[in-house]
Image (cartoon, rainbow, N blue to C red):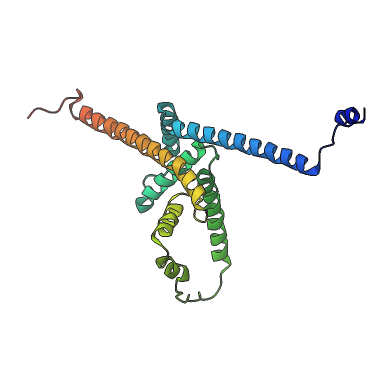
């Protein structure tokens, strides 16, 4: 009788059992989140290779370039590159670190330019001469191993990844490189379209028939 009563009583869960359950639950949630992030990355990589996304980017790039002053001399190429990168970051919708870095860098440069103009207006008296400084970080960079130097270079190439660890740099580069490839394809197609239309209109205006003049 006593043995049956002992067997029927339920043993309350201990603290260790509850902690194990919490750990298993957190581990399952972490795995589900990692799988969801992996799925989003795969969809993002496939998006940059799709023809529909390239057409959307091309149309938005054409609209952005129409607002750029292309007769600005040496700064024309920089203005075109900034417009192309800005449209590319907008197409990424801020879901990646590199796209957010491009968009925030534009705002930072805008405020820095306004502050510089304000300081120039307030500045009075002769300007102070700046002393030359030795780049300590540059000297340290020469003594780094080859792998770390390559990681550092890759971090400089991917926007927003200058001070990030290697896993973050690789994850951003895997998304940034297909986006750049799509940008190159779209800009090449847009250049062919613009130069092709200008050459055909020039040939057509030669005699009004679109045929080359007779020799």
Taking the spot 41% from the left edge, 34% from the top edge, the residue there is 62
Name the side, left or right, on which 40 lies relative to 142. right
Taking the spot 35% from the left edge, 35% from the top edge, the residue there is 185
Taking the spot 39% from the left edge, 60% from the top edge, the residue there is 146
**Residue 207, x across and y down, in percent:** 18, 26
**Residue 165, x across and y down, in percent:** 52, 53
Q: Nearer the viewer, residue 205 or 132?
A: 132
Furthest-left residue in view?
215
Furthest-right residue in view?
1
Q: Is residue 109 above or below residue 128?
A: above
**Residue 189, x across and y down, in percent:** 33, 33
Q: Nearer the viewer, residue 24 or 130?
A: 24
**Residue 163, x across and y down, in percent:** 52, 56
Q: Nearer the viewer, residue 194 or 9?
A: 9
Taking the spot 20% from the left edge, 24% from the top edge, the residue there is 210
Q: Is residue 157 above or below residue 185?
A: below
Q: Is residue 182 above or below residue 173?
A: above
Name the side, left or right, on which 40 lies relative to 212. right
* Image quadrant where residue 190 sits: top left
* Image quadrant where residue 197 sits: top left
| Total marks placed | 0
Q: Quadrant of the N terminus?
A: top right
Q: Quadrant of the C terminus?
A: top left
């Amino acid at each position: 009788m006593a043995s049956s009563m002992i067997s029927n009583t339920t043993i309350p869960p201990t603290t260790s059992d509850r902690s194990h359950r919490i750990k298993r639950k957190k581990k399952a949630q972490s795995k589900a989140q990692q799988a969801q992030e992996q799925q989003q990355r795969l969809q993002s990589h496939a998006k940059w290779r799709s023809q529909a996304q390239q057409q959307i980017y091309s149309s938005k790039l054409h609209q952005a370039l129409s607002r750029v002053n292309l007769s600005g001399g040496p700064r024309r190429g920089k203005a075109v590159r900034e417009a192309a990168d800005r449209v590319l970051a907008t197409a990424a919708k801020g879901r990646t670190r590199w796209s957010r870095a491009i968009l925030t860098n534009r705002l930072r440069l805008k405020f820095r330019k306004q502050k510089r103009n304000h300081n120039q207006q307030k500045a009075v008296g002769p300007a102070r001469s700046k002393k030359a400084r030795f780049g300590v970080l540059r000297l340290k960079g020469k003594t780094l191993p080859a792998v770390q130097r390559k990681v550092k270079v890759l971090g400089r190439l991917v926007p927003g990844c200058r001070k990030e660890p290697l896993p973050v740099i690789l994850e951003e580069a895997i998304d940034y490189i297909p986006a750049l490839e799509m940008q190159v394809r779209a800009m090449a197609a847009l250049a062919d379209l613009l130069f092709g239309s200008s050459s055909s209109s020039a040939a057509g205006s030669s005699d009004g028939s679109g045929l080359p003049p007779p020799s």
